[in-house]
Image (cartoon, rainbow, N blue to C red):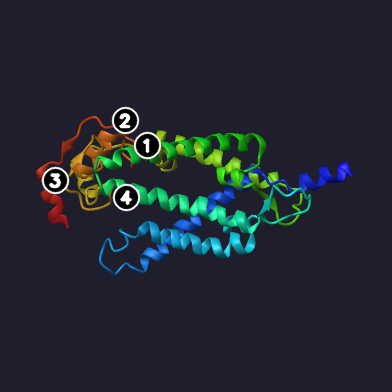
Amino acid sequence: MAPRKENTKSINRVLRISQLDALELNKALEQLVWSQFTQCFHGFKPGLLTCFEPEVKAFLWLFLWRFTIYSKNATVGQSVLNIQYKNDFSPNQRYQPPSKNQKIWYAVCTIGGRWLEERCYDLFRNHRLASFGKVKQCVNFVVGLLKLGSLINFLIFLQRGKFATLTERLLGIRSVFCKPQNIREVGFEYMNRELLWHGFAEFLIFLLPLINIQKLKAKLSSWCIPFTGAPNSDDTLVTSGKECSLCGEWPTMPHTIGCQHIFCYYCVKSNFLFDMYFTCPKCGTEVHSLQPLKSGIEMSEVNAL
């Protein structure tokens, strides 16, 4: 009998990560419901729900509680993860759902507690009287104690794996699986492939900014097309000066860098400022001096066109 009980406990035990995931799913659902509800009043006067926001939220959360925990013994997040609440105070080893009183007190502690906190905050913010000072201090002290208790409960939960929230511990309800869970089998081939591609992508992100693309293109072009020499005559400048060697457009304020190719002033200047070892992408000549094109060459080129 003892091994059988231990086997049952091991099957019904819920992983800590599953319980935390269920809490996060519940928060995401509440945010989604609230955003959808506020969109219904998008065309109304701004601030219409501000005065009654705590009450409206409490009504919506009570509506969700009615059709989740009260009816199905589980929140929406727990239902997605095959989890439900169990009455931990029951001496019976079989599954016993939470009692009606436990469900009602769950709503009072969660929904009522949040409503009271928000309403007290609005009340103290709008009434700055001396008589509210002591009441505000008492409320802040109680809230601080509850936050401290939640922290201590969370640390105990990380150690033992039961009662993810303080409300569950006080009411004696814990999470169990609805159906027996199978052993998780993880395919490491997919994980290894993802890790490999992730590491390769990080390596490329680190390496690419260190590579001078313009200089690499110039080197490749010089290897593929052998460079026979750089004539210095004005005729060569005229024939190659119809377009910028960088942008491919008609040169604006044409300049040369010591070779037979023509560049826009802003194109070659920006590249030279970015890379002090900038070379011509056509022939690979390094920048010796940035000089404007002679006016006689410009006029002869225009006449030629």
Furthest residue toward front: 131
Q: Residue at x 29, y 42 (%)?
A: 132
The residue mark sitting in front, 2 or 4, is 4
Whether residue 283 is visible, yes or no, is no
Image quarter of residue 75: bottom right
Q: Residue at x 80, y 48 (%)?
A: 8
Q: Amino acid at mark 3?
A: Ile
In the picture shown, does residue 288 fall above or below 201?
Answer: above
Dot 3 or dot 2, earlier in sequence = 2
**Residue at mark 3 to residue at mark 2: CA–CA distance:** 28 Å
Q: Secondary structure at mark 4?
A: helix
- The percent coordinates of residue 82 (x first, y second) are 67, 56
**Tag 1 near tag 3, CB within 8 Å:** no
Residue toward you, 121 or 204 = 121
Dot 1 or dot 2, earlier in sequence = 1
Q: Amino acid at mark 1?
A: Lys
Furthest residue toward right: 1
Where does label 1 land, which residue? 215
Dot 2 or dot 4, earlier in sequence = 4
Where does label 3 land, which residue? 297
The residue mark sitting in front, 4 or 3, is 4
The residue mark sitting in front, 3 or 2, is 2
Where does label 2 land, which residue? 277
Residue toward you, 19 or 232 = 19
Q: Is residue 261 left or right of residue 155?
A: left
**Tag 4 near tag 3, CB within 8 Å:** no
- The percent coordinates of residue 212 (x first, y second) are 38, 36
**Tag 1 near tag 2, CB within 8 Å:** yes
Q: Is residue 11 left or right of residue 87?
A: right
Where does label 4 land, which residue? 122
Q: Amino acid at mark 2?
A: Tyr
